[in-house]
Amino acid sequence: MPMPHQVQMQVIKRRIDGKDGSDRIRELRAILAELPGYRNGPYADIRKWVNAEIERSRVRSRVVHRDSLAVRREGVAQVALVGPPNAGKSSLLQALSNIQIKTGDYPFTTLRPIPALTRIHGVLIQLVEIPGLISGAAEDRGGGRALLGVLRGADAIVYCHDASAPPDAFEDVRAEVAAAGIEKPSLLVATKLDDAGAGEREVLERLRSAAPGLPVIGVSVLDDERLDALRDEIWNLTGLIRVFTRRPGSGETDPLALHVHATVQDVAASLHGELADATVGARIWGDSVRFAGQRVGRDHRVADGDVVEVLT
């Protein structure tokens, strides 16, 4: 008796996580050989997905060369950490994600984009550290075009700036991003706040003056409360909402990340494609309804924090 198809998909994704090229294709073929040979239903859909993933992996292995800076997307959103050299990006990435990376008090310690997953409000967000950008990056100085290309694919930007440094280097980075025509939801983080000589208020006001209209927050990798506040700000940048789903008769809930205008049908589609067609509505506990457990139709718009029980 095969395991439930939702569990099977989770197992498959765990097995191929982190594998690329021939290793990924080899693992996908092994998975395909193990799957039941059903022609219809959820397991047939899984076989189609695995076959499509094999083909995508073949194409990717042909077109991606060793000097490529492409970053494979993971999680529900990708947020880039951007700033001048030695702005504290690596230490911040390590503090937010627990990834172990090389850090140093000298420029250009990081030479390639470094991705890492972090869990924010129960869902996985991918953070990507972009190596230090310098003046002229948009004209390819320091390999800037490739780095800006990675940034262009992100959903949001966290600008990082050493709190003890003058704002000139940050202004140069922001100018290069603008020159490349990149516009994303953004905020500015004053890093190493515990090492700044000036008072915190003075540091943040100086940066707010240098970046009018851009939210500014100060952090120290030694201060858990400040890191939690930054996680909240990063979540806000994604523009996503969290919806919790549960099966009928079950008290357990699982978080989903959806766009702000998501409906019950979108919730069902996130669980399984066939469920989106089969759903007739849902029972909801949360801000989008007048009373707990209210039954709504498939076009009902959900709200952040709603608990949704999809009905078919």
Image (cartoon, grey):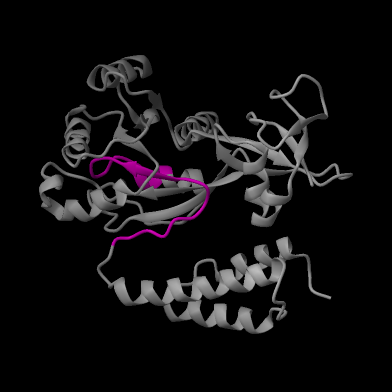
Q: Quadrant of the N terminus?
A: bottom right
Q: Which residue, as the protein is rendered here, is positioned at the far right?
A: 249
- Identity of the residue drawn at 62% across and 80% down: 32
Q: Quadrant of residue 110?
A: bottom left
Q: Where residue 264 sits in the image (x, y, percent)? A: 67, 38
| Magenta-drawn segment | 69-92
Taking depth in this image into account, of 280 and 143 the one nearest to the observer is: 280
Residue at horizontal 26%, vertical 52%? 149
Image quarter of residue 303: top right
Quadrant of res 87: top left
Of 127 and 70, which appears nearest the observer? 70
Q: Main secondary structure of the magenta part?
A: loop
Residue 151 horizontal/vertical position (percent): 30, 47
Looking at the image, residue 310 lies above or below residue 17: above
In the rendered image, residue 156, in percent from the top left (x then y), is placed at 38, 39
Between 10 and 287, which is closer to the camera in this rendering? Answer: 287
Looking at the image, residue 284 lies above or below residue 111: above
Q: Viewed as shown, does residue 194 lie left or right of 272?
A: left
